Image (spheres, grey):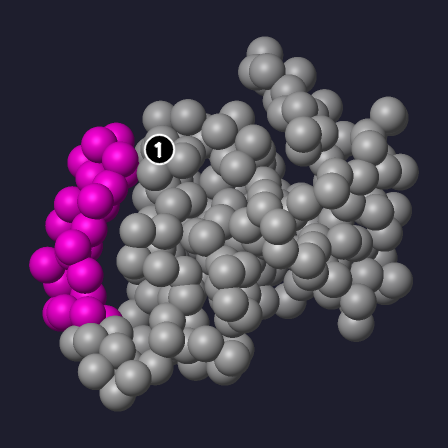
Amino acid sequence: MAVELEPSWLQVLSGEFDKPYMTGLRKFLKEEKDAGHKIFPKNADIFNAFNTTPFDNIKVVILGQDPYHGENQAHGLSFSVQKGITIPPSLRNIYKELSTDIPGFITPSHGDLTEWAKQGVLLLNASLTVRSGTPGSHQKRGWETFTDTVIKKISDEKEGIIFILWGAFAQAKAELIDGKKHHIIKSPHPSPFSADRGFFGAKPFSKTNEILIKEGKKPVDWQIH
């Protein structure tokens, strides 16, 4: 697994790639492939969140858990799917919330959230790979150690970042974030199983823009074109 990483991230994370857990993770991924398992996303997209949102540009972090495990879905951005792929239920609910939270928001015809990532929204999954058709299959193999380090580095080295934490899994990561210098927005997960329990109506997107404007930063244009 050769790592091609955007320069500002490489500077922040350079020491991680030689650590024992990362060696173990590489070994595990090789074993998966050698056993004939298909892994998503494809190699070139594993670090897509980092390469699309440089460390220097981060304004917002939206934390997901696992990449999508279906063909051509995952492309390295949490909650996002490639164009031409059916919009998954959680993302459909995210769009539904946006349509009531952001005036004039028009529900997009696709689920590719690259436009958010280019504006400084880091779309980070806790695990960066998954075996085809098997959700959670690459959890507890080392990715969480890596992405916890990412969250901690953002917390330690930046200020005023907005962390959007949906559901219990993401909210458990709050302990890695310094709440005195960053903003944490929490609500239930947008999954159909929990969206009606407080995700709808939580207004995370307008709240994020209010904070950005207050801090003199450019708000996010949430409209996907």
| Quadrant housing the N terminus | bottom left
Q: Residues within 10 Å of mark 1 (few under 14, many from 20)?
A: many
Residue appearing at x 35%, y 59% in the figure? 42
The residue depicted at 88 percent of the width and 62 percent of the height is 196
Residue 193 in sight in this render: yes
Task: Give the quarter of the figure containing the C terminus.
Answer: top right
Q: Residue furthest front?
A: 84
| Residue farthest along the left direction in this orientation | 18
Q: Which residues are magenta?
A: 1-26
With respect to residue 93, does 144 lie above or below?
Answer: below
User: Which residue is labeled 1 in the image?
Assistant: 55
Give how far across and how far down residue 126 sits, in percent: 45, 61
Question: Residue, x 49% and y 49% (percent of image)?
Answer: 77
Tell me if residue 18 is in the magenta stretch.
yes
Q: Is residue 169 above or below residue 205?
A: below
**Residue at the image position 41 percent from the left and 61 percent from the top:** 41
Give coordinates of residue 224: x percent, y percent.
67, 33
Looking at the image, which is closer to me, 65 or 4?
Answer: 4
Q: Which quadrant of the view contains residue 217?
A: top right
**Residue type (three-letter) at the residue carrying disc 1:** Phe
Left or right for 66, reference 56: right
Question: Taking 30 as reference, is 200 above or below it?
Answer: above
Q: Nearer the viewer, residue 162 or 31?
A: 31
Q: Is residue 139 visible?
A: no
In this view, which residue lies farthest toward the bottom? 35
Q: Secondary structure at mark 1?
A: helix
Query: How many numbered discs?
Result: 1
Left or right relative to 107: residue 119: left
The image quadrant of residue 194 is bottom right
Q: Is residue 115 magenta?
A: no
In the image, taking residue 216 as reference, residue 202 lies left or right, namely: right
